[in-house]
Image (tube, grey):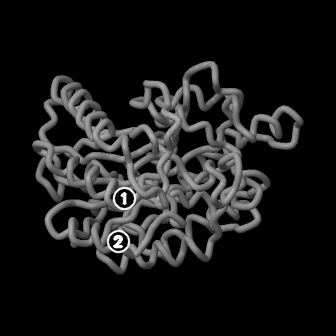
Amino acid sequence: MVTISLQNKTKNQTKEVLTIGRYFKKKFKEKVYKTPISISGFTCPNIDGSVAKGGCTFCENDSFSPNLQEKKPKFKLNPRVNENPFLDKQLMQLEMQFNATKQRLENKFGAKKFIVYFQSFTNTYAPFETLKALYSKALSFENVIGLSIGTRTDCMTDEILDYLEELAKEKEIWVEYGIQSFYDKTLDKINRGDDSANMVKWIEKTKQRGLKVCGHLIYGLPDETQEMMLNSFKKTLELKVDSIKFHPLYVVKNTLLTKEFKKGNFTPISEELYVDTVVKSIKNLPQNVSVQRVTAGIDDNTLLSPLWCNNKHRQIKKIREALLKEGLKY
């Protein structure tokens, strides 16, 4: 286990925030690049009706799936299907996406080490044999040092954790859980289909296996105050996560949240409040917890509100400047 502290400097100088890039460079002696993968056929129990209908109110997953460009197949995975006739195609898709992204990163940055990031939808919500085939294929690629698997806590099992624990003996294995909030009333409002007790249970079990955990938090969820957002952040830290991603809640077309926004029942978080909340959070990060993302955005015509989310780079600049005023270098 590697513990990395913020670089301690003199009282009047800045401290470096432990970004995931700094963590990887310290551990592997060079930059490590995450390659996002979107595998056709994956969905989630909140979309297919297993735990809820319609998905989370903010979910229009194509917005977060730059590699998922082909037409979606009618076949959808879930852990209960007996066989997966599309596995060979999915393995080919995985290899093609990885190679294309790897080539771009090599050409642009001279990248040499990679982590395959199973990003879109719920990447443990499939038959176990399918997961093993995809994960082992990803780890077989040249210069891949590990995996990062995006999922939900209600889609984790002991069987999957057993397998990931074995992989972690040789590779860098991360599980990224969409937490969003630890307030059950908020989770109900966003049609999450999961609750805080279950999130605590599976994050703790994941950590007990020695796996790395990244928690995703959304700031600006319906009716949440800054105090509530920071309480969810505090609860996440209490679970000994290794890393955190921060996201603002924004409204895109074709979501359940669109209707509430157009009715005037939902007001998105202001840029000022979002930046202030993220800065307050990072100021209170333990020195060995890394930050993988400070904001998110979308710059096409699917964005309805808030319009400040149309330029992620501008947001990062504002957050970086605000952190510098607090003596922190992002």
Q: Position of residue 294 (x, y in %)?
A: 48, 46
Q: Residue at x 50, y 31 (%)?
A: 72
Q: Position of residue 124 (x, y in %)?
A: 42, 58
Residue 13 visible in the displayed image? no
Crowd class of label 1 (few under 14; some 14 to 19; many from 20; radius 10 Å) = many
Q: Assess whether mark 2 and mark 1 are in contact (beta carbons under 8 angstroms).
A: no
Q: Which residue is mark 1?
A: 290
Q: CA–CA distance between discs 1 and 2?
A: 22 Å
For the point 28% across and 48% down, the residue is 21
Element marked by disc 1: strand
Amino acid type of the residue tagged 1 in the rendering = Ser
- Residue 306 % position (x, y): 69, 32
Q: Is residue 267 above or below residue 24?
A: above
Q: Nearer the viewer, mark 1 or mark 2?
A: 2
Q: Residue at x 54, y 66 (%)?
A: 154
Q: Is residue 125 found left or right of 255 in the rendered image? A: left
Task: Name the residue that disc number 2 marks.
Answer: 161
Left or right, residue 142 beside residue 31? left
Give the answer, above or below, for where 172 lies relative to 58.
below
Rendering quarter of residue 114: top left
Q: Residue 129 versus residue 6: which sits nearer the camera?
A: 129
